[in-house]
Image: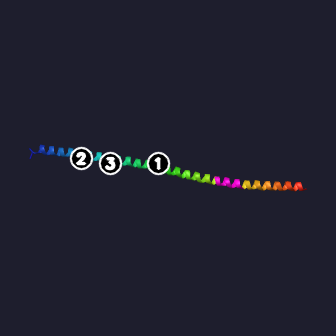
Amino acid sequence: IKGLQPDVERILSERKQERRRLEERHQEASDAQRKEFVDLAQVQLREAREKLAQEHERSLEEEREVHRRRAREEFDRLGGQLAEERARCAADLLAERRRHERA
C-alpha cells in the first residue's frame, strides 16, 4: 500500500488540477456570458432612450403644430372681426357724410 501512495497522490493532484481548470473555464464562460448580457442590456437601453427621445420630439412637434394652427385660427378670426369693424366704420362714416351733405 505504501508503494501505491505516490501514484494515489499524483492522481489526486491531477484531479485537483483538472478541477481547477474546469472551475476556471466555468468562471471564464460565466464572465463572458455576463459581459454579453451587460452589452446587450446597454444596447437595448440606448435603443430605448433613442426611441423615447424620438417619441418626445414627435410629441413636441405635434404640440407645436396644434399651437400654430390655433394661433392661425385666432389670427384669421380676429382679422375677420377687424375687417367687419372697418366695414361698419366705413359705412357709418359714409352715412354720416351723407347726412352732413344733406344738411
Asked if the residues shown at circle 2 and circle 1 are in contact, with their CB atoms under 8 angstroms apart, the answer is: no
Q: Nearer the viewer, residue 102 or 32?
A: 102
Expressed as whole percent of the image width and height from the top left, the position of residue 78 reads 70, 54
Is 1 placed left or right of 57 in the picture? left
Residue placed under numbered mark 3 in the picture = 33
Q: Which residues are magenta?
A: 72-80
* Residue 29 belongs to the span the image colors magenta: no
Q: Amino acid at mark 2?
A: Leu
Expressed as whole percent of the image width and height from the top left, the position of residue 16 reads 20, 45
Residue placed under numbered mark 1 in the picture = 50
Quarter-of-image position of residue 20: top left
Real-space CA distance between mark 1 and mark 3, rounded to the nearest whole angstrom: 26 Å
Residue placed under numbered mark 2 in the picture = 22
Q: Nearer the viewer, residue 49 or 90?
A: 90
Residue at image coords 17%, 46%: 12
Question: Crowding at label 3, few (<14), some or many (≥20) Cα neighbours within 10 Å?
Answer: few
